[in-house]
Image (cartoon, rainbow, N blue to C red):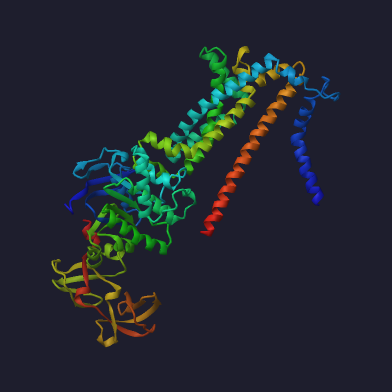
């Protein structure tokens, strides 16, 4: 029985991680073949860093993700504060409206955004691409910030006013620090979504503003270059490192709180 | 100048979603007093406090502070500070920074901030806790920090919104004494909101009893207890027997099937009245010696006294406090002296 359960877990994780493992292994494959591993090499990594198309697309993606993420954080946080101040009925309505773009298939969002840009005669390019990314990122930020605002004791804001803060100071000094985890999560998720997105970017970018996913897609139609494997490996490793850091940090914080609680118990 | 008025509410009306919360409140609060707003939940006591703090705007009426109208002054410009329900400490700041918050905003030099924060820590008995995370403090400790944070700005008036509501009984009693001490030392006017009548009687110089957005009675704890203005106040402040009666003429009232001498006058002849008698004012005796006769229904030991319920021949349940034990089922006589019979106008008639 014990063996079976272990076996089951093994299969699940193999299922999840085998594709990535294959990708990583083949990024070190000397031959261009996708089936036979011939020799270990770093040459795809070297080639990657001289491939202007891929590097350019990567830079585009990063730029779009950051700009769209920052704009979405500002817009989404303000929206969340507004929604939180509304009465229950209006809140319910607005939240449903906010949800819709998130469950809407990307392809529809992409096509409709493209149609909109054409309709208002906006040339496709970085502006349209960033606007499109902001569109699907704002709901993500709202849904990450809103729970933090709901947890916040309204009297904390009142207490700040009571002690002499004007409303802007009260927001900056006591509300913002409290909802910061939600804002940060919203920002990181926005960036992830931006990196992930293909459908919307495909319809709203021009030749000079293509993101990584769009470029890879157009390359794959001919043949997957092992450089893509190399790039994917690097991105995977970076994400893994970030995740590890976050987890270690969390664990440390928890330990600290536990220790203090124990101390408290003794006093 | 000792008793000059510091806060005045004139004809304050507040409505939330069309429902009236405060109806024409008029109130003067004197400087250096410990004033308590007392009433059941929903009576408008917290709203009254929030009007003074500037967190609620009245629909009509004026708020005066030291003779100046402050209706349009936002909370951060008012010389009052508040201790909020559940304390509302800033979770991202430690004890020291929570207390220093108001002074930091005023750009007070660091040296003076330090001095005054420690002064406050001493006042609320929290020295040594300045580096603690406020989220890891007990309820009583958070309470003290909240008080220190509000008092450090040296407000003329401190507003306290059910500050002891979340504490257990023993801690609550300790904090009552401590709050009263702090108020006496600082000479700051305290306006205190509670639904706990014992708390109100223990701490206050003046008690304001509220009900359904209206003030019922204003007076010292002793006045309120001994001379409640109507049956509601009598019932809310301590326990009472409230029985229907008829005022035959001045100094003579009929209830429980017979006439009683009393000390009240000025009622209409044969006016229907509420007769209020405190449980501790009723004496139990042999049946033939009492003014009323009845049978002991139940007896409960309450610590200082027994609480005895006696059903009289008309079926009315009398609540009596006595230090002597009475056997349930026994026939007894009840008597009360004229001074302890309190006659009140019927409430329904008052509202006309």
- Vertical position of residue A79 compared to residue A148: above or below: above
Identity of the residue drawn at 80% across and 23% down: A41
- Left or right: where does residue A238 sit relative to residue B27? right
Left or right: where A173 falls relative to A65: left
Answer left or right for A198 relative to B137.
right
The percent position of residue B115, horizontal first and vertical second, equals: 35, 47
B25, A259: nearer the viewer: A259
Above or below for B341 versus B330: above
Query: Which quadrant is home to the C terminus of chain B?
Result: bottom left
Whether residue B105 is visible to the viewer of this picture, yes or no, is: yes
Tell whether B316 sits left or right of B343.
right
Q: Residue furthest front?
A: B111
- Viewer-nearest residue: B275 or B224: B224
Residue at 21% across, 41% down: B69
Q: Position of residue B340 (x, y in %)?
A: 22, 73
Question: What residue lies at 53% left-to-right and 31% top-to-bottom?
Answer: A139
The number of callouts visible is 0
Residue at x 81%, y 48% (from the top left corner): A4
Does any portion of residue B36 appear in the rendered image?
Answer: no
**Compared to B233, does A31 lie above or below?**
above
Give percent across and percent down for residue A28.
Answer: 79, 25
In the image, residue B202 sits, relative to residue A22, either above or below, namely below
Question: Where residue B41 sits in the image (x, y, percent)?
Answer: 35, 55
**Where on the picture, by quarter, is residue B280?**
bottom left
């Amino acid at each position: 029985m014990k063996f079976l359960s272990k076996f089951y877990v093994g299969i699940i994780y193999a299922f999840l991680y085998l594709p990535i493992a294959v990708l990583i292994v083949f990024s070190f494959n000397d031959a261009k073949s996708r089936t036979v591993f011939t020799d270990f090499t770093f040459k795809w990594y070297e080639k990657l860093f001289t491939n202007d198309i891929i590097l350019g697309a990567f830079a585009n993606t990063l730029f779009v993700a950051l700009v769209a993420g920052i704009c979405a954080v500002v817009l989404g946080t303000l929206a969340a504060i507004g929604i939180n101040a509304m009465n229950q009925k209006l809140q319910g309505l607005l939240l449903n409206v906010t949800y819709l773009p998130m469950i809407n298939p990307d392809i529809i969002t992409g096509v409709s955004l493209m149609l909109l840009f054409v309709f208002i005669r906006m040339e496709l390019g970085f502006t349209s691409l960033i606007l499109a990314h902001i569109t699907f990122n704002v709901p993500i930020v709202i849904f990450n910030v809103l729970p933090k605002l709901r947890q916040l004791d309204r009297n904390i804001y009142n207490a700040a006013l009571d002690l002499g803060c004007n409303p802007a100071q009260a927001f900056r000094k006591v509300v913002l620090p409290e909802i910061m985890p939600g804002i940060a999560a919203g920002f990181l998720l926005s960036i992830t979504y931006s990196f992930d997105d293909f459908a919307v970017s495909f319809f709203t970018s021009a030749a000079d503003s293509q993101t990584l996913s769009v470029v890879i897609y157009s390359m794959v139609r001919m043949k997957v270059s092992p450089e893509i494997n190399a790039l994917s490996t690097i991105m995977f490793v970076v994400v893994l490192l970030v995740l590890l850091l976050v987890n270690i940090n969390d664990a440390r914080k928890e330990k600290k709180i536990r220790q203090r609680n124990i101390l408290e118990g003794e006093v | 100048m000792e008793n000059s008025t510091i806060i005045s509410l004139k004809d304050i009306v507040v409505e939330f979603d069309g429902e009236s919360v405060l109806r024409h409140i008029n109130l003067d609060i004197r400087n250096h007093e410990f004033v308590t707003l007392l009433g059941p939940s929903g009576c408008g006591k917290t709203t009254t406090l929030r009007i003074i703090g500037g967190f609620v705007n009245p629909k009509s009426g004026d708020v005066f502070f030291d003779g100046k109208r402050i209706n349009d002054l936002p909370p951060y410009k008012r010389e009052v500070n508040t201790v909020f329900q559940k304390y509302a400490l800033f979770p991202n700041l430690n004890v020291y920074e929570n207390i220093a918050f108001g002074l930091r905003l005023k750009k007070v030099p660091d040296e003076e901030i330090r001095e005054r924060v420690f002064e406050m820590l001493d006042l609320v008995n929290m020295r040594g806790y300045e580096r603690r995370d406020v989220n890891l403090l007990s309820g009583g400790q958070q309470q003290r920090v909240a008080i220190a944070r509000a008092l450090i700005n040296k407000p003329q008036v401190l507003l306290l919104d059910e500050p002891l509501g979340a504490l257990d009984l023993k801690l609550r009693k300790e904090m009552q004494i401590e709050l009263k001490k702090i108020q006496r030392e600082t000479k700051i006017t305290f306006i205190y909101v509670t639904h706990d009548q014992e708390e109100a009687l223990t701490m206050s110089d003046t008690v304001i009893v509220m009900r359904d957005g209206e003030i019922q009675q204003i007076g010292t704890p002793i006045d309120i207890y001994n001379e409640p203005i109507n049956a509601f106040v009598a019932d809310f402040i301590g326990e009472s027997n409230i029985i229907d009666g008829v005022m035959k003429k001045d100094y003579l009232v009929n209830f429980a099937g017979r006439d009683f001498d009393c000390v009240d006058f000025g009622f209409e002849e044969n006016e229907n009245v509420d007769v209020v008698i405190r449980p501790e004012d009723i004496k139990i005796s042999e049946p033939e010696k009492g003014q009323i006769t009845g049978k002991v229904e139940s007896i409960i030991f309450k610590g200082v006294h027994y609480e005895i319920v006696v059903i009289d021949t008309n079926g009315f349940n009398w609540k009596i406090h006595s230090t002597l034990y009475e056997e349930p089922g026994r026939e007894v006589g009840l008597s009360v002296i004229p001074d302890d019979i309190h006659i009140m106008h019927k409430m329904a008639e008052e509202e006309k």
